[in-house]
Amino acid sequence: RKAKLFPPVPPLSFLHSFWSDGEQTPESRTFHSAAFCRPAMEINDGEEEEEFEFSRNYFLAKELGGSSKKSGRKISDIDPVDEQELRTAANNLEPKHEREVASLMESYKASYPEWGFMLRTGFGLLMYGFGSKKALIEDFASTSLTEYSVVVINGYVQSINLKQVMVAIAEVWWDQLKAKRRNSPSQAQQPFNSRSIDDLLAFMDGQEADDDKSFVCIIVNNIDGPGLREPESQHLLARIASCTHIRIIASIDHVNAPLLWDKKMVHTQFNWYWYHVPTFAPYVVEGVFFPLILAHSSTAQSAKTAAIVLQSLTPNAQSVFRVLAEYQLSHPDVEGMPIESLYAASRERFLVSSQVTLNSHLTEFKDHELVKTRRNADGQDCVYIPLANDGLQKLLPEINP
Amino acid sequence: GSIETREVHSAVAFVSARREWLDGKQNERVEVEAQKTESGLVPTHLALGSCHRGGATSGFTVSEFTPAGKLLVPSGSSSKGLHLHCCCYMEPFTILHKASSRKTDKISTGTGKSRTTRRIDLTASLPASTDISDVNAAESNERHYSNMRMEAFEAVWSSTESSIKDVLREANATIFSEIHEWVRDSFDTIVSFGVPNFHEATQPFPVVKDATSKQIFTGLVLTRNIEFVDDLVTFEDLKQHLKSQGCHVANLSSVDFSSKNGVGTCLRSLLGQFVTGSLDTADISMLATWYKEQQNNDNPVVIIIDDMERCCASILSEFIHMLSEWVLKVPAILIMGVATTVDAPRNVLPSNALHRLHARKFTFQSLPEKMNYVVETAFVKQSSEFTISHKTAVFMRNYFVHQNGSVTSFIRALKIACAQHFSTQPLCFILHWFLRDEDNEVPQSHIYGLSQERMLKLAFDLPSWKSTNNQITQLSGETLLDGLTQLKKLHKTWRMVVLCLYEAIKGENVQLLDLMCEALDPKGPFASQFDIGSRVLPSDDSTSQKFHSLEKNKGLINRAIRRVKELPANQLLVLMKAWEKHTVDVPEFHSEVKALVLSLLKLEENGESLNQNKVEMTNTRKQALRGHLNGADKNLRVANEKASNLVDLMVRRYMCPVECVALHEVLCFDCVDQLQAALIGDMRRRIQMDLQDFHAIIRCSCCSKRGSTILPSMPDSSIMYTLAQEHGDVVNVHDWYQSFKSVVLSTHMVSKRGKSRSKQHSPTPKKRKTTSELSQPSEASIQARFCKAIVELQVTGLVRMPNRRRPDYLQRLAFGS
């Protein structure tokens, strides 16, 4: 009977390959689908069939993948609009279904008492479902959790210093404790800034409170966000969440988010209570750090801006740039053009008279991010143009011959 | 207008001015400037949001700002004022509000280094302050009631939880004391190698003796759990036990033995548990110093490592080497949890580390045994009356057997069920009333915010009451009291029967949970006589008869009854003695069991005397004796038969599944779907379901289901997700964009063709209006929508950005649900 049990939770290092841009093996994915995407347990027999469906989908997709590779259309074929225009348009988009989304949010208000109850019984609330849940959770906290201090951590921010967060939480908890027993003399406190993490945890876990029902609530928006994805962060968060005087509400959006935790964290530390609360609210802040695909990789775009900059430079400077560009086109696989070679080539064509002149040109290029430098395998300093070859080809005709 | 000064504490802030204000004053310039503070201007590139001005956008960027810079915004003279959203979204963390009894409009933000407090005027959005006192009163009432419910829940749950914990600890008691004894012996052996003298003890390096003195006594504990979560609980108990016996105990987990941080982490963690004060460096000599400073040095240092197999082998062996060098100064004894077999250390550790270990094996209770204890305590013997329905029991059993396999999670599931019961069932406080044993008076519902009439109404409206007692017209507190007493009594006898059955079948490696599921089944073969009405049990007689005959020889209950019939005399006697204990409350059975015990005792006495006589037997008397033996045999058969009939009668008369009793909803949790949703978040599937069936969630009028056609009014992400289904594991961005574009542009066609109809159908989306008024969505806006949708799919992890090797393809990460 026990043979049907799932394989153990994978070591967390596995996560990185899963999330990073590195290639992913099909094994890891099938493993994942078997272990974590299994439909919730059902008493009937539909389960196996669904699972079959699931793996079939995967293989179908893989098969299709082979055939669709033949469609070799490029992003640049879309003919992306000017980046500025795109960003303006993106900031100006009219949200769809605004009213329905608002009423959906409103409908969750009826669940607030239940959420509060579960939080008080010691569970951590884990909100998932499509749409940004930031507004929903914060609204819940500011209407239903007024008697507790609430600290918000934004996981979608790129880097978060959890120690600082802990210091802030400890200070808030200290204030809350002080307010509770005003008459008793407050003992001298070592400033939280200089305490160790273990000390802070012990403080939040301590039995100092007169009634152990009060707590500090932590809201973690996107606990699966880039700022908190490291296993260390998750372990620390789990330890914070398991403190007696801490309750946690978190939101997850990434389908693989549950892989962040092992069973100890899920069942004993975070003590998750899942809520499916799709909001369909746009991911505005959550998506800030994601590049817009058409703005990011549009070669035409960068070629155009490069051309504008180049046209304002002297003809000799433009010609030096051309030398570099032509070299780069004819040597697509090297790190860049060694500065000495560039100097020699430019001197040959009477474009520069000395290294100093070349350097002044290069400085100008670098300031406008037209070229960058790096070392090649021989340790020489090389310059290169940070543009793809097709971009370069578009650029060349626009420079003076 | 007047200038309002708001402090902004952040490097990056989003400022968006509300349309209402700006629409009217399109020409007014919004001034955003950074003011000099004493610290001077710090040039920081800022990405500030934008002001919408009637559709057109004028973005503004402030390139200079101070960490505590000031943002100056002229507030309009209009009453609405400038609604400034300075939400500091890009802060790593903020303090939303501090604890207070009243609602607060203060928001303070802070990072670790510098903190300033900022006030945001939210008065415009606060409700009118007319009936605030009413609201407050209602609120405080509500809070009071919710606190009372909370209290009731805590009382009920803590009684269950503490008894479970006790029983688990008791189950381990013998093995714990065995471990303690071994720890003591090992310590004595270490001490016998020699105690370092004062001079040696003060040196910051280890004492060197012969090789045998370098051995570390190691207890390998076979935890026999499936999940290491359960081990944690056991080891915590063990730690407490050893501590209470005077040992110095520290817990290390596999996280401390990670290859990333080296041996320093586990040393630091170890020192942190013994030495107080801040630790700048972790060094084992500090541990030796600490040990020397202890008042009496006659206690060992026990180090428990939760899960030895998950530790990094090199770090662990380094740690073992270090301990073994210092063992004379720090008499350390290791206890390592092993999840598989005793061979594990041999597989994990290098031989030179193995040589340092002097191992001994201990074995904990197996998981099924533990599970039986838990179920017995939680459902069959428990002090609180809370119980679960048959469906829930089956679900929890499956959850345990197929999905989770850990006792801790099972208890957690039970807690969720209990909490849900208290948050959904208005009459749940009766459980608290049961617990306090005030059966002789009607429950005081008003304490829990429920008037007496309301309570009665709720109780007598319960389906189980209606289906059984519809002939009773006199509905009073007494009726309820009678009903509840009856409920409690029947529940008690049910537990008695289950316990007796379990005693009978215990030796056969049977899970109590399985037996319980069978006994709880309101449609099971034994429940028919407790039928509470056709409403609950819709099956007609013929099929149920058939079912019964089919089931007759299956099932654990039948097996138990059969087994009683075949038990040998001594086992039967043990069983009857156990029954004698359990049936105290039902005199009818108690007396019969007693009689059986007596007859069995007599049988045994006879048997013994026979055995004694055997020695002096002569051939002539053998014949007579055989007859006598046959008689004894016959007597045993009779006893077996009697016991079997008795248990059969018990089952038929008293094993009434709780769901067949009136008012059972009060103490029985039945929302299995809710429990499942809370327990097993099905992240991957649900996100995709959301995108596919968004219509079922947001219920808009514009995108009603029309087969599988993709409608342009659908959310962009849904369109994109649906389109991606047609691609393989990689999606060509260009193709994707083209199909997206054609879908979006089809909106235009639809709205052109049936403008009036579409307006009727979808009054909501402004998009529709603007697109039908404007000739066509611009290329830029389509591209922007495409990009945004991809960003959203990326946030949810459904696609991944192109990599260097395939710059024009996105990779799909999830494949249908």
Image (tube, coloured by chain):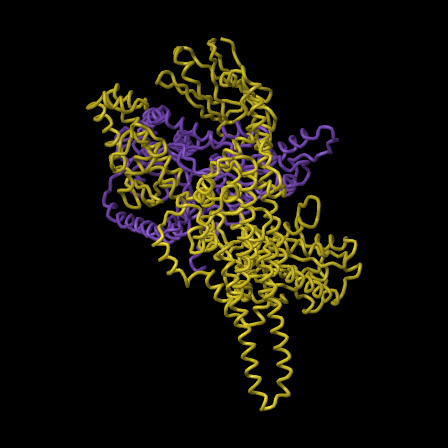
- Check the image and name the residue furthest to the left: B753
In the rendered image of this protein, which colour is used for chain B?
yellow
Picture residue at 40% right of the left edge, 26% below the top: A102
Viewer-nearest residue: B784 or B125: B125
Q: Position of residue B173 (x, y in %)?
A: 65, 59
Q: Residue at x 56, y 18 (%)?
A: B132
Image quadrant in which the C terminus of chain A is located: top left
Height in image: B620 above or below A264?
below
Find residue B296 and report its horizontal and vertical position in percent. 78, 56
Most foreground residue, A11 or A131? A131
Q: Which chain is purple?
A: A
Residue B258 visible, this orientation:
no
Q: Which image quadrant is residue A342 in?
A: top left
Quarter of the picture holding the N terminus of chain A: bottom left
Q: Position of residue B110 (x, y in %)?
A: 57, 28
Compared across the picture, whether B332 is left or right of B758 comes to: right
Looking at the image, which is closer to me, A8 or B757? B757
Q: Is residue A20 left or right of residue B268?
A: left
B262 w.r.t. B435: above or below: below
